[in-house]
Image (cartoon, grey):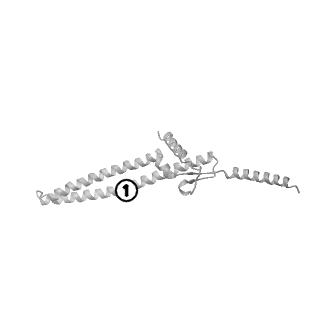
Amino acid sequence: MDFKKTFRTLGLSVGVLAITSFSYAGGFACVNTQEVMQKSTYAKELGDSINKKVQEVKQKLKSYETTLQNLQKEIESKAISKQAKKQKIKEYEDVRLKAIEYQQDAQKQLQAMQEKAGREFTQTLKTAVTNYAKSHNLEGVFDCNQMLYNGNLDITSTIIKTIDSAHNTTHK
């Protein structure tokens, strides 16, 4: 039995096996989804639209509050007749109920906006990651926040650029 020939054959077999395994296994990468949400201009735009709505709601509620305070002062005034006081109390209750209804509706609208923005962002992120993975022959992409060690697997900055450039070309 020739040991050199056996080792050469064994070495060649291991080499072919390693190359075959490597080409089949592809590779893996990770994306820091928190960083994408914080640094992506697209994510910021989604957040800004929600914040704009929150400010509108706050302003409207402040208006209701001011109206209620003014009505309260009128009700407590000694210079008001009983009939006028009765009318102001009814008006106060009507405004208070409108304010409560507005606040409840606004909360529903904001929740729907947040859910929609979350779905849109998640879909955009998945699309960007999927396209990147396919074009780089990756078998999987993980969230970097779930990995104990990621070495050179982090593709977060590339994904942020991909999302932002895709958003800029489709929404302008």
Rendered residue at 26%/54% (across/down): 64
| Nearer to me, 102 or 153 | 153
Tell me if residue 161 comes above or below residue 73 in the rendering: above
* Image coordinates for residue 27, horizontal then vertical, percent: 64, 51
Tag count: 1
User: Which quadrant of the rendered structure holds the N terminus?
Assistant: bottom right
| Residue type pointed to by label 1 | Gln
* Image coordinates for residue 4, horizontal then vertical, percent: 84, 53
Rendered residue at 35%/56% (across/down): 105
| Nearer to me, 83 or 100 | 100
Assess disc 1: are there few (<14), some (14-19) or many (≥20) residues with their C-alpha within 10 Å of its C-alpha. some
* Image coordinates for residue 139, horizontal then vertical, percent: 63, 52
| Nearer to me, 164 or 98 | 164
* Image coordinates for residue 50, horizontal then vertical, percent: 40, 50
Q: Is residue 168 left or right of residue 72?
A: right
Q: Is residue 35 left or right of residue 58?
A: right
Rendered residue at 48%/50% (across/down): 37
Per the image, label 1 sits on a secondary structure element best described as: helix
The residue singled out by tag 1 in the image is: 107
Rendered residue at 39%/56% (across/down): 108
Q: Is residue 27 left or right of residue 122?
A: right
Q: Is residue 152 left or right of residue 41?
A: right
Residue lying at the far right of the rendered structure: 1
